[in-house]
Amino acid sequence: MLTIRLAEPADLAAIIAFDAFPGDRIIEIVERRMLVLDIDGRAQGYASWQKNGCIGKDYVNKLVVSEACRGKGMAKQLITALNTVLVGRVFISAPGNNISAIRLLESAGWVRAGGIVGLLPLGEAEIFFYRDLWPEQTS
């Protein structure tokens, strides 16, 4: 069974198994800044955010699903569920060469805000998106 819920410390071991991002996820979990995609009691993806992390607005800084869940619409379900924990204008970004992430964000209703060159190596642009989230949104 698939559920999307706030992460718990017990999810950390499963997250570490598929998470390629540096850093310590336990802080995000303890501060209640992470949703997990739970399939049959095991975390298979997550989205985490920084409060006021982008020009004073909440910023989704990580969206990750396990290899087994990629290409199945799971990341879209996870990002769509952000309206259960975040309200107002929210930002997210993706490297300009990550076509899959850009397509996902556009298909989930995120609006391209622009790009910044110089954040990533080799002069590649980081593309920023925003969406106004409200609890009643379902798509």
Image (cartoon, rainbow, N blue to C red):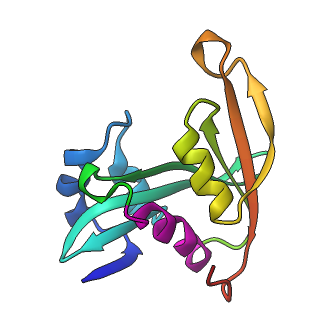
Q: Which residues are magenta?
A: 72-85
Which quadrant would residue 73 be assigned to in this image?
A: bottom left
Q: Position of residue 17 (x, y in %)?
A: 19, 47
Picture layout, residue 83 above or below residue 18: below
Q: Residue at x 67, y 13 (%)?
A: 123
2 left or right, relative to 50 = left
Picture layout, residue 101 above or below residue 1: above
Q: Position of residue 20 (x, y in %)?
A: 32, 37
Q: Residue at x 30, y 68 (%)?
A: 8
Q: Residue at x 53, y 74 (%)?
A: 81
Q: Is residue 117 magenta?
A: no
Q: Position of residue 83 (x, y in %)?
A: 62, 76
Which quadrant would residue 2 be assigned to in this image?
A: bottom left
* SS assignment for the magenta stretch, majority: helix
Q: Residue at x 57, y 39 (%)?
A: 99
Picture layout, residue 97 above or below residue 130: above
The residue nearer to you, when weighing 33 against 103, is: 103
Q: Position of residue 57 (x, y in %)?
A: 75, 55
The residue nearer to you, when weighing 104 against 38, is: 104
The residue nearer to you, when weighing 17 against 127, is: 127
Q: Is residue 83 magenta?
A: yes
